[in-house]
Image (cartoon, rainbow, N blue to C red):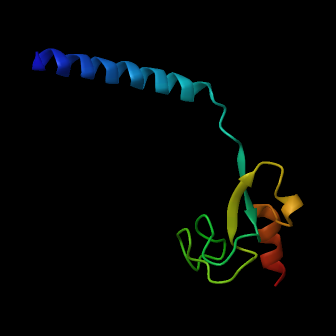
Amino acid sequence: MNTRLIASSALASVLAMGLLSTAQAQDKPAEKEKCFGIAKAGANDCANLSGTHSCAGQNKNAMGADEWNYVAKGTCAKMGGKSADEAKAGMMKK
């Protein structure tokens, strides 16, 4: 009886995983873009443009021009941020 319980539990798990992966495949992932100049101190998503750090959460100053966060595509300008090209151009002027 114990073997039968283990076998049915394993089968149920396999079937459940199949249903979960099918449901996830149908969801359309949200498109994101990097938005520079909006990251709060310690809340950036990854390395900055100037190369002073290479990991998330390491920026020291809020709203640094070379720091970025992922945002929903098309919302960066509304938030007062810049694209990567705009941020690079702004850094070269200084």
Residue 85's place in the image compared with 41, above or below, is above
The quadrant in which residue 14 appears is top left
Q: Residue at x 86, y 67 (%)?
A: 80
Q: Nearer the viewer, residue 60 or 65?
A: 60
- Left or right of 66? Residue 14 is left
Residue 27, given in percent of the width and then of the height, sits at: 63, 30
Q: Residue at x 79, y 78 (%)?
A: 92
Among the 4 quarters of the image, the one containing residue 47: bottom right
Expressed as whole percent of the image width and height from the top left, the position of residue 93 reads: 84, 80
Name the one closer to the observer, 40 or 49: 40
Q: Residue at x 24, y 16 (%)?
A: 8
In front: 34, or 39?
Answer: 39
Name the image quarter holding the N terminus. Answer: top left
Up-down relation of residue 87 to residue 74 (above or below): below
Q: Pick the residue in front: 36 or 1.
A: 1
Q: Position of residue 28 (x, y in %)?
A: 67, 32
Question: Residue at horizontal 71%, vertical 48%?
Answer: 32
Residue 6, given in percent of the width and then of the height, sits at 18, 22
> Is residue 30 shown above or below 44?
above
